[in-house]
Amino acid sequence: TESETDTEPEPDLPTEPERGSLFSPAEAVDLDPAPDVVHVELTAAPHSFEIAGEMVDGWAYNGQVPGPTIRMRRGDALVVDFHNDLEDPTTVHWHGLHVPFEMDGVTWQGAPVEPGGDFVYTFTLDQAGTYWYHPHVDTERQADLGLYGVLIVEDPDEPVADRELVVVFDSWGEHDADSEAGGHHGLDGADLTWTTNGLIDPLFEANAGESIRLRAVNVANAGYVDLTWTTGGEPGVRQIASDQGLLPELVEAPSVVLAPSDRADFEWLVGPDFAGLEVLNQPYSLLGAPSQGEPLRLFEVELAEGGTGEPAPGPLAWPFDGLEPTPDPGAGVTDVLYAFHGDPHTGDWTINGELFPDITIESLSLGAWSVVELRNVSQAAHPFHLHGHAFEVLSVDGEPPPWRIVEDTFDVPPYATARLGLLPDNPGDWMAHCHILPHVEGGMMTVLRVE
Ligand code: C2O
Ligand code: CU
């Protein structure tokens, strides 16, 4: 993404081929010279790739896993010429983006793109942040096989870090795309292979004196990522953004949990005394607690030879808005109530006792601030995702969040009640579901109508 201006000749050092160097996924080529239009081609097709030394007969967008990162600026129009070269129907869903309903890539209304077929997805985006795209047909299997990519909407008002690193975490079980259930499940942390941009425990080389913006996405079907950092002090690893763009302020947390489909952005300031950084995943169990297993290393950062030797700069001037959480108006004010039930033994996961598609459609009025209450009456955590909108977390078990949290996916802990506030500003029949894809297959999906 960023071109290196440092033209040190590459010394002929022995490399560690089994480990791999960490780079951001290649970006989609913008075919339109107009400054405010991003026009890309996206083709879904079978693709073989290697995970942990084994070949996987998977699927990919444009022949790469993760698929091409689509980068645009707030206010740009995106045009995606999508082509389906698979033997199955598919769609592209733009996770976290407020797209017009007919561009949402769901089959609730509207047919999927048939094998050999095309579809032009086009919309304008006015929200900055780190998003991603994936199919919304037979999602568990299709995403599992390698269909996912990152979509970045830059904000011209945000400072530009010296370097940006996009990392996509995925978990892989049996490396057999043809198996009944697909490749990677990750119901429990125990025996999963985690990849970062398709590589196992790759190495990233940071330059002393640079600031790095890290955009992290967890695309695993069911596995949680609990990011922890091994070095205290230097470099500072600070969270600056979550699902829906910048946080209200800089957050220094010892760890950050990414539920399936969650994103977080971080700022790192690399000082001259930087002695390496390990980014670890404490395996996380579906039942909502870190497992007892050893943490896995997702990737490692080393100081590159050379660099400026300058002291690390101070935090970049992010335009945080400093907003406080909106107060929860209290249990008397609830527009929609969703109760999550489930039984890990039968595999039935329900919302209000209903299994998708046999659901009752709840409605919200366009333009009227609304409260959605999520009552998790199951022993599993459920990352609740709503299409076409962002929401604010008002409270969890009656407690306001520590800072203002605006998300499109929120992980509701076991037996907890979360209350969300949102402005329904996008008319449509929006899917609302748990983003643990085996739970979706088990029925945990509904439709929230905004009219
Ligand atoms: Cu990531 Cu219904 O989507
Ligand atoms: Cu769930």
Image (cartoon, rainbow, N blue to C red):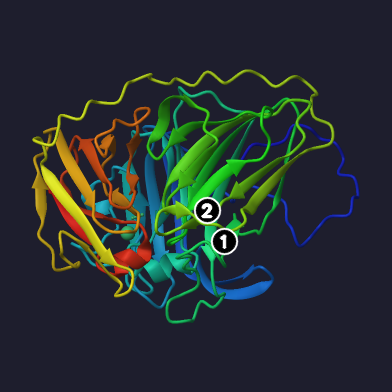
Q: Report, in whole angstroms, how far the alpha carbon at label 1 lies from the one at label 2.
A: 7 Å
In which quadrant is the C terminus drawn? top left
On screen, residue 449 versus residue 385, left or right, reads: left
Front one among 32 and 14: 14
Residue 177 seen in render? yes
**Residue that sits furthest to the front in the current view:** 292
Three-letter code, disc 2: Pro
Three-letter code, disc 1: Gln
**In terms of secondary structure, where does tag 1 sit?**
loop
Residue 296: image x %, image y %?
A: 63, 55
Residue annotated with mark 2 = 68
Looking at the image, is 136 positioned above or below residue 417?
Answer: below
Numbered disc total = 2
- Do labels 1 and 2 touch, CB within 8 Å? yes
Residue annotated with mark 1 = 64
In the picture, residue 274 is in which quadrant?
top right
Residue neighbourhood size for the residue with mark 2, other residues' Cα within 10 Å, grouped as few (<14), some (14–19), many (≥20): many
Front one among 234 and 433: 234
Q: Tell whether circle 1 marks a residue whose Cβ is less than 8 angstroms from ligand 1.
A: no
Residue 100: image x %, image y %?
A: 24, 46
Q: Which quadrant does ligand 2 occupy?
A: bottom left
Residue at (32% x, 59% y) in the render: 379
Looking at the image, is 122 positioned above or below residue 163?
Answer: below
Looking at the image, is 240 positioned above or below residue 227?
Answer: above
